[in-house]
Image: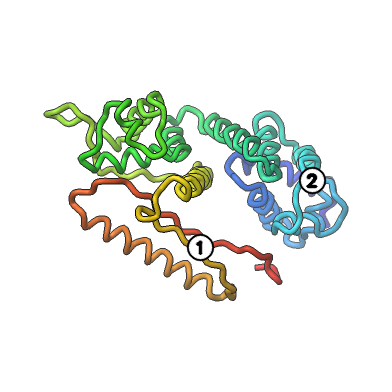
């Protein structure tokens, strides 16, 4: 039988081995800690986990992890104390909790920027990983890269900035061109010395994939909202449908959505002389709570 002090010591050790800065969802971090404890102590329960983190011996942590109960900043600090989080790890944890609690767009954006900066510091001197993370933090990096495959592309920052919709600043265009060269996506032509696409691909490792994906989709959703007001109907296709679905159908629906996306990419790939860059977003998400835990 493990004593309470022994349990908490094991939890402290695991918190040191599982950095919170690897996660962009506090629920996933807590779940990882719980399963790590479960592997150490077979009889470990969510009630014990709750008690070890400073709560009553109930299933409150299960509800928080499953998204059925919010985690307040106050309780977030309680968990940080129980885990012994300090310095950058504690700062990251508290910003992560505040990010999910915040509903105000400006505050949420500021908190996300803090998380990006802290994540970059956690990556240390890995310029390659930091550059990959930066690529996904702004929508226009990908747009400029895709534009480089069209005759309209220019590596003059001022002209390039004016080509994008919405327009970006000249300094942003200049920095984006430099970033794309760092990533090996653009390189000077041997003859003309003008930047050209290299056909290289950018991939994200486990260190930044979740952060990059969330940031990328946030930006794309923002652009989609703007497109409703700024792009003529003849030049866009935006639709939405609500439907009742059984959970068993989710894998099939996801496969069909991926298949559709690949078909569209294949159609676009047939064009040897593309003129414009388009963005296609496909969203499918629940709008009601599950009747039973998934």
Along the viewing direction, whichever of 274 and 269 lies nearer the viewer: 274
Q: Residue furthest top?
A: 171
Seen at 75% across and 51% down, the residue is 70
Q: Is residue 77 above or below residue 1?
A: above
Q: How is the image coloured?
A: rainbow
Q: Residue furthest right?
A: 56
**x, y (%) of residue 168?**
41, 31
Mark 2 surroundings: few (<14), some (14-19) or many (≥20) residues within 10 A: some
Q: Is residue 252 left or right of residue 291?
A: left
- For the question of whether residue 182 can be seen, the reply is no
Seen at 11% across and 29% down, the residue is 191
Along the viewing direction, whichever of 278 and 229 lies nearer the viewer: 229
**x, y (%) of residue 97?**
70, 42
Earlier residue among tags 1 and 2: 2
Quarter of the N terminus within the rendering: bottom right
**x, y (%) of residue 228?**
47, 50
Seen at 45% across and 31% down, the residue is 126
Q: How many marks?
A: 2
Q: Are marks 1 and 2 in contact (CB under 8 Å)?
A: no
For mark 1, what is the residue?
A: 240
**x, y (%) of residue 291?**
71, 71
Label drawn at residue 8: 2
Q: Is residue 66 left or right of residue 244?
A: right
Q: Secondary structure at mark 1?
A: loop
Residue 165, image quadrant: top left
Label drawn at residue 25: none
Which of the two marks, 1 or 2, is nearer to us in this view? 1
Along the viewing direction, whichever of 103 and 78 lies nearer the viewer: 103
Q: Is residue 265 above or below residue 244?
A: above
């Amino acid at each position: 039988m493990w004593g309470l002090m022994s349990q908490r010591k094991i939890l402290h050790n695991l918190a040191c081995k599982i950095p919170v800065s690897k996660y962009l969802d506090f629920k996933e971090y807590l779940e990882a800690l719980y399963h790590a404890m479960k592997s150490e102590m077979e009889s470990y329960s969510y009630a014990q986990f709750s008690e070890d983190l400073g709560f009553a011996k109930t299933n409150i942590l299960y509800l928080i992890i499953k998204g059925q109960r919010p985690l307040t900043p106050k309780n977030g600090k309680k968990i940080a104390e129980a885990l012994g989080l300090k310095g950058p790890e504690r700062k990251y944890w508290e910003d992560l909790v505040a990010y999910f609690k915040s509903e105000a767009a400006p505050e949420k954006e500021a908190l996300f920027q803090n998380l990006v900066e802290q994540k970059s510091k956690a990556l240390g001197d890995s310029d390659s990983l930091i550059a990959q993370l930066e690529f996904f933090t702004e929508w226009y990096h990908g747009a400029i890269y895709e534009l480089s495959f069209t005759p309209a592309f220019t590596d003059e920052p001022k002209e390039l900035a004016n080509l994008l919709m919405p327009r970006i600043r000249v300094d942003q265009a200049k920095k984006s061109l430099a970033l794309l060269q760092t990533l090996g996506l653009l390189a000077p032509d041997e003859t003309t010395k003008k930047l050209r696409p290299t056909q290289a691909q950018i991939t994200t490792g486990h260190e930044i994939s979740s952060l990059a994906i969330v940031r990328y989709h946030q930006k794309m959703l923002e652009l989609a909202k703007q497109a409703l007001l700024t792009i003529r109907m003849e030049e866009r296709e935006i639709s939405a449908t609500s439907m009742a679905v059984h959970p068993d159908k989710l894998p099939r629906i996801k496969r069909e959505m991926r298949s559709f996306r690949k078909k569209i990419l294949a159609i676009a790939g047939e064009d040897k002389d593309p003129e414009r860059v388009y963005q296609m977003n496909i969203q499918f998400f629940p709008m009601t709570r599950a009747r039973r835990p998934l």
